[in-house]
Image: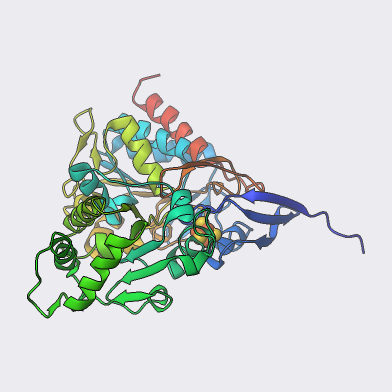
């Protein structure tokens, strides 16, 4: 039997989480991924999910009674543009699992439509951005942490499950230039109400009470300033453990706080991050200390960056007055959907039906819904029109921003199946068609 022709791609970037590991090796035979090396389980799975399957969309579809029928791209673009042009207040949401060039075109389309433009930060690290806008942020790159950090705090984040290779590449086991002994040269602290798998491999786990991070952060700040804490316990943590932690923070050589949605989406939200950033800044009176959010979607950092360089604002943007206005809580997707202010939605590279509140999802489903999505999801299953994209970072190139704002070029390892177009091509065609319908061409 003739041996199969295996195409091996090296230094492939994983387009799954904000760690953007860039050392994967992918074997492709007959345009199918057959092997992925170096990836974690979730990243590897994404590469295999690009192969044709009953769950992969390969042609544009339109709702036809209780099922869907295939239509041409010309028809799909025309009908989508018709819906969006007729809508008084369309929502364009998602953008965090696609590349920056498509994100930029998304901004252009939202402006043209006078719609609401939002990305997934509005339900994950939006509070981190609000805090950074208030108090700034002392931060650095993952490479610096790898080479220098001897004290690492994971606050409200569980990288063992959410960013599995972060620990092995940057923050825990990895040997760095000044941390030659890897894990033995670092002291790992986890602050989390749950006994997570990351907590189980940490040197110290402080099991803070749910929703009491703000109190704990400020107790640490007070102790750092020399205030005597007279309570025996604060936010479920023994005062003696707080004092021991403060001592370690002050005496480490280089510390970093990595924080996740356990801090951004619990009580106090952006005030938690505000306090964490202030603590980081205050620790620099004693040693070097920095802070970095653990971003989830692989290019949510890019979405915030691209939206900002185009409009001045990172998310929750309203174009209804013809210029961008920014007001999270008023123009955030969840809020405009709950208040039923939206009369059509274009969802790209995300799945709000899986994680938005029921009331907002119900309202989204009430109005025309277009989904640009490679696989069947709870959102796409209710869409009126489904536009199938090539998967960025697997089936087309592009740029993505790692969680520390380092831009990385995504690679292409195979062709998209069926008639898929790239996200960029789809949005460009929509822009042209919307302009035509508005008489701007
Ligand atoms: S840690 Fe994230 S970027 Fe790295 S391989 Fe896993 S999913 Fe992909």
- Looking at this view, name the residue that lies furthest to the top: 441
Q: Is 304 in front, or is 203?
A: 203
Q: Is 217 in front, or is 116?
A: 217
Asked if 258 appears above or below 103 in the picture, the reply is below
- Looking at this view, name the residue that lies furthest to the left: 230
Asked if 220 appears above or below 31 in the picture, the reply is below
Horizontal side of residue 428 vs 110, given as left or right: right
Q: Residue at x 25, y 67 (%)?
A: 247
For the image, the number of numbered tags is 0
Q: Position of residue 398 (x, y in %)?
A: 53, 39
- Looking at this view, name the residue that lies furthest to the right: 1
**Residue 323 appears in view:** yes
Q: Quadrant of the N terminus?
A: bottom right
Q: Is 152 in front, or is 348?
A: 152
Horizontal side of residue 325 vs 80, given as left or right: left
Q: Residue at x 71, y 52 (%)?
A: 31
Q: Position of residue 97 (x, y in %)?
A: 45, 50
**Residue 260 appears in view:** no
Q: Position of residue 162 (x, y in %)?
A: 43, 65
């Amino acid at each position: 039997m003739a041996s199969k022709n295996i195409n091996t791609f090296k230094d492939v970037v994983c387009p799954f989480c904000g760690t953007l590991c860039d050392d994967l090796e992918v074997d492709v035979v007959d345009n199918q991924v057959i092997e992925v090396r170096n990836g974690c389980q979730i990243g590897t799975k994404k590469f295999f999910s690009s192969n044709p399957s009953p769950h992969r969309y390969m042609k544009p579809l339109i709702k036809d009674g209780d099922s869907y029928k295939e239509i041409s791209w010309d028809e799909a673009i025309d009908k989508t543009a018709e819906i969006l042009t007729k809508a008084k207040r369309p929502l364009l949401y998602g953008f965090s699992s696609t590349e920056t060039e498509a994100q930029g075109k998304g901004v252009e389309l939202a402006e043209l439509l006078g719609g609401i433009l939002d990305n997934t930060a509005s339900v994950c690290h939006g509070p981190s951005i609000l805090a950074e806008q208030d108090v700034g942020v002392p931060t650095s790159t993952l490479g610096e942490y790898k080479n220098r950090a001897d004290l690492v705090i994971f606050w409200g984040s569980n990288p063992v499950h959410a960013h599995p290779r972060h620990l092995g590449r940057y923050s825990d086991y990895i040997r760095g230039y000044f941390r030659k002994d890897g894990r033995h040269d670092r002291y790992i602290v986890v602050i989390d109400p749950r006994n997570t798998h990351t907590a189980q491999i940490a040197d110290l786990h402080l099991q803070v009470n749910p929703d009491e991070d703000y109190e704990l952060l400020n107790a640490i700040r007070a102790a750092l300033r020399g205030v005597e804490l007279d309570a025996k316990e604060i936010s479920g943590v023994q005062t003696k453990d707080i004092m021991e932690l403060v001592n370690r923070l002050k005496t480490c050589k280089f510390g970093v706080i990595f924080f996740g949605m356990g801090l951004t989406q619990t009580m106090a939200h952006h005030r938690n991050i505000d306090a964490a950033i202030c603590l980081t800044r205050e620790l620099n009176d004693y040693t070097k200390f920095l802070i970095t959010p653990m971003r989830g979607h692989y290019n949510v950092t890019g979405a915030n960056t691209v939206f900002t360089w185009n409009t001045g604002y990172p998310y929750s943007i309203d174009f209804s007055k013809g210029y961008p206005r920014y007001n999270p809580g008023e123009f955030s997707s969840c809020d405009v959907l709950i208040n039923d202010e939206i009369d059509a939605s274009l969802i790209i590279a995300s799945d709000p039906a899986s994680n938005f509140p029921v009331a907002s999802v119900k309202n989204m489903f009430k109005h025309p819904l277009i989904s640009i999505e490679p696989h069947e999801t709870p959102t796409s299953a209710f869409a009126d029109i489904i536009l199938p994209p090539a998967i960025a970072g697997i089936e087309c190139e592009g740029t993505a921003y790692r969680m520390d704002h380092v831009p990385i070029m995504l690679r292409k390892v195979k062709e998209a199946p069926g008639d898929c177009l790239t996200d960029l091509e789809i949005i460009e065609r929509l822009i042209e068609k919307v302009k035509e319908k508005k008489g701007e061409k």
